[in-house]
Image (spheres, grey):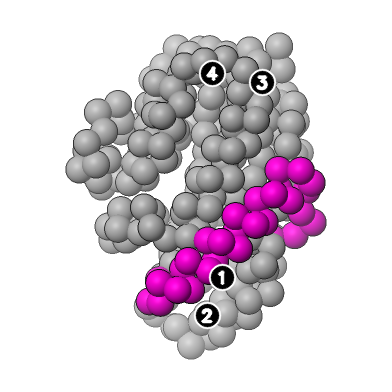
Amino acid sequence: MQKHLYADLYQLEDTHWWHKAKRENAISLLLRFLSNNNPKILDIGCGAGKNVEELSKIGLTWGIDNSSEAIKYCKKRGLKTVILGDAKSINFSSSSFDIITLFDVLEHTDDRETLREVYRLLKPGGLLVISVPAFPKLWSKWDVVLHHKRRYTKKSLIQELKQYPFDVLKISYMFSFLFIPAYLIRVIKSRISSKNYKSDFRINAPVINYFLLILSRFERFFIQNLSLPFGTSLICVAKKEL
């Protein structure tokens, strides 16, 4: 991710509907499958640190990111258990964590190397919670700005997880209501924004931000109980097999 976007993330991840909805979806699914109290948690690619802050309400949480800019904003948030490091080689011993989270991180990495390291770090029966951007057809200049290497389908993400092996407990698309608008907006912006592609996260009207948050919370019922067939992102909970 480009350096200036960490300031953007720090400002928006507390209030922007997309960040809040993704976090709420992930944590609600995590709590559904969590079986032990006060788990040890690692948030890989912790960014500006809001997810570490929220996960710390569930258990003892560490964060790791390969950007010194990200760590700077984590420190600004008052977080102390954050370290600079690479997702494919993390300086913790094997079977250290009950939960590992990868919130929009896997698409930035060599996914097989990252998942191999996650598998090493998780305790047997430990949980992995992932969110990733969905559908290659939604690829745009925003993906390039964010340094994405790929977008996933449900099938392709399951195939990667089965390599190690993980048992997929739950997988669903999310933000289904954005699928068609996102496709149209990104096509238009990519054509008219030859150099400076403006952030897709900028919403100037608070009422729109609030409306989209409410809509995403309504959608969460279906994510929890069913599996949505399309959306702009995927969310998944998997377990390291015993």
Q: CA distance from mark 2 to mark 1?
A: 7 Å
Q: Position of residue 28 (x, y in %)?
A: 59, 38
- Mark 3 crowdedness (10 Å alpha carbons): few <14, some 14-19, many ≥20: many
Q: Which mark is residue 190?
A: 2
Q: CA distance from mark 3 to mark 4?
A: 10 Å
Reading the image, the residue beneath label 4 is: 98
For marks 4 and 2, give the one nearer the viewer: 4
For marks 3 and 2, give the one nearer the viewer: 3
- The residue under label 4 is which amino acid type? Asp
**Is 228 situated above or below 96?**
below
Reading the image, the residue beneath label 1 is: 140
Q: Which residues are magenta?
A: 202-231
Which label's residue is closer to the chain start, 3 or 4?
A: 4
- Mark 2 crowdedness (10 Å alpha carbons): few <14, some 14-19, many ≥20: some
Which label's residue is closer to the chain start, 2 or 1?
A: 1
For marks 1 and 4, give the one nearer the viewer: 4
Quarter of the picture holding the C terminus: top right
- The residue under label 1 is which amino acid type? Ser
Q: Position of residue 91 (x, y in %)?
A: 38, 20
Judging from the image, what secondary structure is the residue with disc 4 in? strand
Quarter of the picture holding the N terminus: bottom left
- The residue under label 3 is which amino acid type? Lys
Q: Nearer the viewer, residue 45 or 98?
A: 98
Reading the image, the residue beneath label 3 is: 240
Q: Position of residue 203 (x, y in %)?
A: 42, 73
Quarter of image, res 171: top right
